[in-house]
Every structure is written in structure tokens, then in C-alpha cells.
Image (cartoon, rainbow, N blue to C red):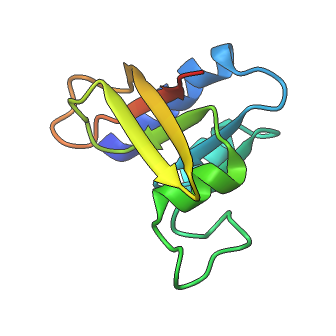
Amino acid sequence: MDERYNTYREISSKLRRELRRGDAILAEEVGICSYYLQNIEVRDVAGIASPDITVANINNWSYFIDTYKPRYLIFIKLLSQEFQTYEYNGHRYTYRLRFVGNPKAEYFGGSVFEKVD
């Protein structure tokens, strides 16, 4: 199995234990996570699982965060910053690093951020 697959599987396993009814997830890539998180709303910024995608909003994290209000953001890379902040239509959304999927991975370690209320 490749590094990305293992990372997404680990992230999905950790999230499964923390998810509450009605939670939504926004991810860079949707396939593996949505497979392991069945019955959870998993959207992606590329538009595969986001029906209102247009050329204007593809890969626009701020747009999708404002639209779907996800509790979690999933990035395939290991990100070092503790917070991610997005603004759209006068709204500000802040997320804090919750955990990494595979800290030993060379590149595709995965970072999960949770919405700060």
C-alpha cells in the first residue's frame, strides 16, 4: 500500500472516533476518506464530491468552508502551522491543528484541522 492510502486510512480511523452527528469534513482529496467515513458528509475542494463546483470556485478553500461549514479540514501534506484561517463574504473561519495522520511519512503525512468556535 502507498503512503497516501495509509495516511488517509489512519486519519479516517481517528476521525471516526471523534465525529458527531451532523459533522462535515472538507478534504483535498475525497476518495479514501469517504470510503472509510461512510455516512459522513465528506466534501472536496476539487469538486468530485461537491456538486456546486464551478471554474470560479475550484480549489477555493474559503468558498467551500463558507458553503459547507465543515468541522474538520484534511490536508494530505504535513503542515507545520498550528492554525489555518479563511475569510469569505465577510465571515472568518479559524481551524486549529488537531492531529497528523502519519507523522513518520516522508511527504504524505496528512494534517487534520478542527474548527475553533
Residue 27 in the image, given as x and y percentages of width and height? 52, 49
In this view of the protein, which residue sits in the foreground, 31 or 83?
83
Q: Position of residue 91 (x, y in %)?
A: 58, 47
Q: Position of residue 54 (x, y in %)?
A: 60, 82
Tell me the quadrant of the picture where the N terminus can be found: top left
111 over 3 or under it: above or below: above
The front one of 78 and 80 is: 80
Is residue 99 shown above or below 72? above
Residue at 44% in and 46% down: 86
- The quarter of the displayed image where residue 17 is located: top right
Quadrant of the rendered structure where residue 16 is?
top right
Give the tally of numbered discs: 0
Q: Residue at x 58, y 59 (%)?
A: 89
- In the displayed orientation, state which residue is furthest to the top: 17
Q: In the image, what residue occupies the spot 52% across and 38% down?
A: 93
Would you say 10 lies left or right of 69 here?
left
Which residue is at 67% across, 47% downward? 42
Q: Residue furthest bottom?
A: 55
